């Protein structure tokens, strides 16, 4: 018996943020939206495809996302280009503590979710 892989991870946004979240994740980050099963479509939110994995964007009220260290880390191939792209869209970049073998930075999405961009060296 073993855990073999990660199927998906979920982040949450307030119900009023769904349109802005689609803009940020699908247009600014360029992640394709994936169809949710019909049985879950009435619950709000949406799913994204990230390589062979999924990120589920769910609805959750009353959460202070700015207070948590929980995050998703996206593996990228050109960290400098991502930094410039995000800064052009007004995203405040936060430097990360160095980790051997990689370069990385962090930011908060428009809802306070912590996001990391990481490039292996």
Image (cartoon, helix red, strand yellow):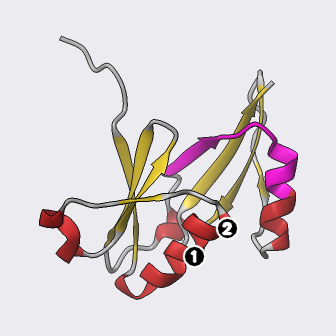
Q: Give the class, few, some or many, for how many residues have Cα within 10 Å of label 2's Cα (few <14, many ≥20).
A: few
The residue lying at 57 percent from left, 58 percent from top is 114
Circles 1 and 2 in contact, beta carbons < 8 Å: yes
Give the Cα separation between the discs numbered 1 and 2: 7 Å
Kindly indicate the quadrant of the structure image that contains residue 107.
Answer: bottom right
Quadrant of the rendered structure where residue 17 is? Answer: bottom left
Q: Position of residue 33 (x, y in %)?
A: 45, 61
| Secondary structure beneath label 2 | helix
Q: Position of residue 99 (x, y in %)?
A: 74, 29
Q: Quadrant of the N terminus?
A: top left
Q: Residues within 10 Å of mark 1 (few under 14, many from 20)?
A: few
As for residue 73 lying within the magenta part, the answer is yes
Q: Which residues are magenta?
A: 71-83
Vertical order, 8 against 119 (above or below) = below
Is 19 left or right of 46, judged from the image as shown?
right
Q: Where residue 41 appears, x then y in whole percent?
A: 21, 71
Residue at left offset 60%, top offset 55%: 115
Tell me, yes or no, whether the highlighted magenta stretch contains residue 49. no
Residue appearing at x 60%, y 71% in the figure: 24
Residue matched to label 2: 28
Residue 66's spot in the image, x, y percent?
A: 54, 69
Q: Earlier in the sequence, mark 1 or mark 2?
A: 1
- Which residue is at 45% across, 73% downward? 64
As drawn, is 44 to the left or to the right of 90? Answer: left
- Helix, strand, or loop for circle 1? helix
Looking at the picture, tell me which residue is in the foreground, 95 or 117: 117
Residue receiving disc 1:
23
Up the image or down, 97 lies above or below 63; here it is: above
């Amino acid at each position: 018996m073993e855990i073999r892989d990660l199927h998906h991870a979920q982040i949450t946004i307030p119900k009023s943020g769904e349109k802005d979240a689609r803009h940020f994740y699908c247009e600014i980050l360029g992640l394709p939206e994936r169809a949710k099963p019909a049985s879950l479509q009435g619950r709000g939110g949406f799913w994204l495809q990230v390589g062979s994995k999924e990120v589920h964007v769910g609805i959750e009220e009353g959460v202070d996302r700015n207070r948590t260290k929980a995050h998703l880390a996206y593996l990228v191939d050109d960290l400098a280009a991502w930094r410039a792209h995000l800064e052009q869209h007004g995203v405040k970049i936060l430097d990360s503590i160095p980790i051997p073998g990689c370069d990385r930075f962090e930011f908060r999405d428009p809802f306070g979710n912590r996001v990391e961009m990481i490039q292996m060296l």
